[in-house]
Amino acid sequence: MKMVTIKDVAARAGVSPKTVSRVINGEDHVRPEIRDAVQKVVAELNYRPNAFARSLSSSRSYLLGLFIDDPVSGYAADVQHGALLRCRERSYHLVVEPVELQRQGWEDHVRGSISSLRLDGAIIAPPICDDARLLDLFVQIGIPHVLIAPSTEPKNSGAVWMDDRRAAHEMTQHLIAQGHRRIGFIQGPLSHSASGRREEGFRAAMGEAGVTVDESAVLRGDFTFRSGLELGETLLDLPDALTAIFASNDDMALGVLITAMKRGIAVPEQLSISGFDDVATSRAAWPQITTIRQPKAEMAAAAVDILTDPGFRKQRVGQAPRLMLPHELITRGSTGKAP
Amino acid sequence: MKMVTIKDVAARAGVSPKTVSRVINGEDHVRPEIRDAVQKVVAELNYRPNAFARSLSSSRSYLLGLFIDDPVSGYAADVQHGALLRCRERSYHLVVEPVELQRQGWEDHVRGSISSLRLDGAIIAPPICDDARLLDLFVQIGIPHVLIAPSTEPKNSGAVWMDDRRAAHEMTQHLIAQGHRRIGFIQGPLSHSASGRREEGFRAAMGEAGVTVDESAVLRGDFTFRSGLELGETLLDLPDALTAIFASNDDMALGVLITAMKRGIAVPEQLSISGFDDVATSRAAWPQITTIRQPKAEMAAAAVDILTDPGFRKQRVGQAPRLMLPHELITRGSTGKAP
DNA sequence: CCAGAGGTTGACATCGATGTCAATCCGGTT
DNA sequence: AACCGGATTGACATCGATGTCAACCTCTGG
């Protein structure tokens, strides 16, 4: 696999390597006719600059790291995809680094990949973006980094969010507007920061509409399909029948849906069900589940934008960038008018 | 972010940079006491070799590329995870490259990332590992590459497989052993290579057991949940009731399961359902689905092993490595004795 | 016609590691 | 005591790009 170098291009175009470098990097101070000539040769020889040589001399790696706990989850996949596409647009590359906080030596691995790959920036996904030790490490190393949907306002890190509270608020309003009053709610796990914000939104909307929340119809789940199944049973056993159930995420909403089906309860005629996240299976289910589209890919893309923004890269002292992205209420078959 | 270089280590340990390099790379010809001393300094300074400098001089990048069509799918996530972990063990890094064959310019992107990152090897996931133009490109560039579960025996590429035919054969035998005779089968899409092999296995096992296949109970799906729902309706409408349905993948099996539930058919008492792939949701469903665990992560890890094997890297002329990995029949709640 | 400003261009050093090869060291022979 | 082979070690060139800076070119205005 013989490689074409910048010298080959230079020789063939009859200019110096430095000039070729200027053309490649779109710098000024090159006469148009020379620029064209060089570009022609580049195309002819199919020349690609050696990323390693470039990084070595320019002390930029054109590499971003995506640090993530569980790269297998659907959430991770969406985040990664968003980041990947944007990186490509920006001519960056993405290196995915799994971080297992519970295992010994994670600190070394993180440190190792950052310093050996000279990452230009890092994107840190939930839930590890909430770990203080991890964040300290990034701050200490001094690498620009952006958190995706962290639970609390970070001091020295950039962050990209969605408004969980408002989204849950909207979803609740949507149910109320359909005439629902007896609405059950399945909370997310305490460990997950968004859980609390979603519950707040639910309660706020209920309060504003003057609807009392039945505390026996508020149960805590753990974001798994199975807990949706189990809590669905409990909720459907309530003496005073609910007309709607709002689960804090889609997996649990799916569980409730299955439970309702098992009992022969018609959705949405007798019972409306709504979720949160818009995972792939919420579209695959039948009826499809009304949910909140969380801008996972967009948040990741925004993080890439921040990290690769030349302005940010220069004067990134002091202000940590913040960005809130819009969500979307997606109305589908699983919700309807209250019976 | 000041970086520690090999010179710093060398100076502090009182040896030459070259000797430090030898220690780092575990080469011979270093006296034990010097080796220890150097390692001590490395630890003290927390030194990490600069991957770019190393690649530039050694003309190895310690980078593998994972080329994949749809990085969002669950299949992709498993493959990626398997590759990622093994890469880490081998001190390699993984760069994920989405390839959209239907879009203009994919060829340039692939070429670009290979030559600019000087990838040491490539892993190509299905379904794009079946695209002749793509494979030609890799062969032409001359980069070592391994295909994951390709549909046909590639000429000049390595490949890692599982035995779809045998797995489907086992699953069918399992159902027959439970007393099932009237077994429905949902085929996969023709576009997906494994579909045919799975159907072969099914038919072979039925034939060996002397059970006639009812062609009206063999329907073609497209691997989606929805097609499972629809075809499930058709199968359960058959006049002569089936006692088991074997779907070519889990998503479709889940569809059948839901359909059965809607109709109040008890699983597995009245109907056994089995799938293929062992995706996450097949464990989340209730009852859990009997399925074939496809060694996705293992195949990816094996691909990494092949590509990073020093022996292979040297004398990789001529023989393209082949490897078949074992699958596993996972018996869960959705199958039982025939009624 | 020349000085000077500003735009172009290339020579050369440099980034941080590894490959090559010669120099050195060591214990055991003759 | 001189010699030898193999194990250690380091000097130096090198990988392929970019940063620096000086040289050069061209055009303008005095």
Image: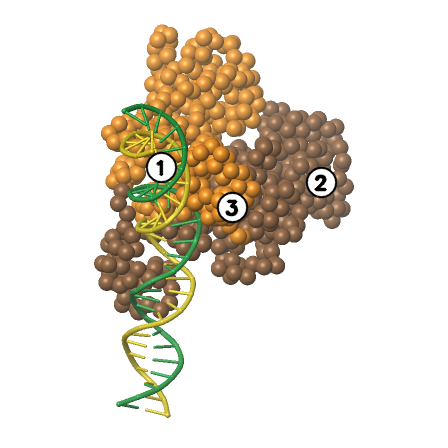
Chain colours: A orange, B brown, C yellow, D green
Q: Residue at x 51, y 21 (%)?
A: A289
Q: Are marks 2 and 1 on the same chain?
A: no
Figure quadrant of residue A295: top left
Residue type at mark 3: give it. Answer: Arg
Q: Position of residue A327 (x, y in %)?
A: 43, 20
Q: Residue at x 54, y 52 (%)?
A: A1
Q: CA gap, disc 2 to disc 3?
A: 73 Å
Specify whether residue A125 is in view: no
Q: Chain of mark 2?
A: B
Q: Position of residue B109 (x, y in %)?
A: 53, 38
Disc 2 packing (10 Å; few <14; some 14–19; many ≥20): some
Q: Which residue is mark 2?
A: B181
Q: Position of residue B153 (x, y in %)?
A: 66, 50
Left or right, B63 with respect to B335, comes to left
Asked whether the beta carbons under mark 2 and mark 3 sit within 8 Å of each other, the answer is no
Q: Which residue is mark 3?
A: A12
Asked whether the beta carbons under mark 1 and mark 3 sit within 8 Å of each other, the answer is no
Q: CA gap, disc 2 to disc 1?
A: 57 Å
Specify whether residue A200 is in view: yes
Figure quadrant of residue A45: top right
Q: Nearer the viewer, residue A306 or A51?
A: A51
Q: Is disc 2 placed on a helix, strand or loop?
A: loop
Q: Chain of mark 1?
A: A
Left or right, A104 with respect to B261, comes to left
Q: Are marks 1 and 3 on the same chain?
A: yes
Q: Is disc 1 placed on a helix, strand or loop?
A: strand
Q: Nearer the viewer, residue B128 or A204?
A: B128
Residue A122, numbered circle: 1
- Which mark is in front, 2 or 3? 3
